[in-house]
Image (cartoon, helix red, strand yellow):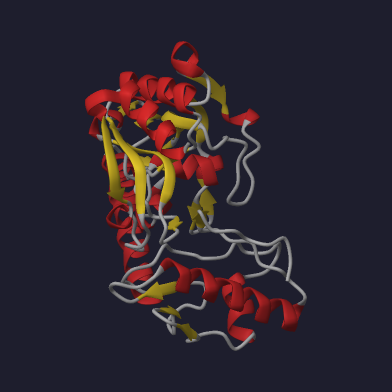
Amino acid sequence: MADDAVGRAVAVLGPRARRDVPLGPLTTYRLGGPAAVLVDADALADLRAVAAAVAASGLPTLVVGRGSNLLVADEGFAGIAVVMGAGLADVAVEGTVVRAGGAASLPVVARRTAAAGLTGFEWAVGVPGSIGGAVRMNAGGHGSDMAASLRSIRVVDLAAGEDGAVPATLPASGLALGFRSSAVRPTQVVVEAELALAVGDRTAAEAEISEIVRWRRANQPGGANAGSVFVNPPGDSAGRLVDEAGAKGLRIGSAEVSPKHANFIQCDPGGRAADVHALMLEVARRVADRSGTWLRPETRLVGLDWPEGP
């Protein structure tokens, strides 16, 4: 039945579809098996085609974005993965209003807005994700987040069928933006975000960007990782809890809790997503045993489960 569903999707997508494409190289962890079907979406027409394929096949969808927050199972993803292309990455600055495509890189938008003499988005230079992914998780850092400047978004719902997959504008006030969370559904693709920034000083904004980059290099590890693994509990730090639980430097197979920052997990070249997942679970259990707090993943798990408690 799964092969039949894939066949129906491919029949609808035609040359847009690629089968059994490894997802690991599309993520910063560089881990994970293949997508049954992968589509490079450079225009709204591509997303409408995906919506038609979903209606015809019933397959699940995964919007990959820049892959900076994904841990994909070694078995892969048995659905349609969508990679947003350059056609959906335009950035336009009009006064203090910025319109950025869902595929636009956060560091690029940060540098573009600083160069335009705007302030309020410098924090994003240190987040290696896309605008669309940043909206979905209300990404943030250095004292700010997407909610601070987001005015509205345009989304396409891949579950709405080809006729219904037209851009809808949603105000930021209706997105329930919380700490690393939002009401944007998994089937909704953010194709554009409108930001409201403030007039600033270009020199000061670019100096702040340089300082953020310096701080990140000094305090966070490089290598294959997906940034912060766990969401900070209210009023606390996940990294502090992991450190206090004695899990900094803990290793399972090819995965290790970073000795440099306890809320990062790094993986060896050629490693396994299963090792990262097992290490996440072991760290969460140790933290729960010590503090009573069950940590919630900030990393988006694809094909991997997360229990509600220890």
Q: Residue at x 49, y 65 (%)?
A: 228
Which residue is the extreme one toward the top? 163
Q: Position of residue 282 (x, y in %)?
A: 60, 78
Q: Residue at x 32, y 23 (%)?
A: 11
Q: Position of residue 120 (x, y in %)?
A: 44, 44
The quadrant of the picture occupied by the C terminus is bottom right
Q: Is residue 155 rendered to the left or right of residue 83? A: right
Q: Residue at x 74, y 66 (%)?
A: 309
Q: Position of residue 164 (x, y in %)?
A: 50, 13
Which of the pair 144/158 is nearer the observer? 158
Which of the pair 161/151 is nearer the observer? 161
Which residue is the extreme one toward the right? 292
Which of the pair 307/248 is nearer the observer? 307
Q: Position of residue 150 (x, y in %)?
A: 51, 35
Q: Looking at the image, is 9 positioned above or below residue 210? A: above
> Which quadrant holds residue 225?
bottom left
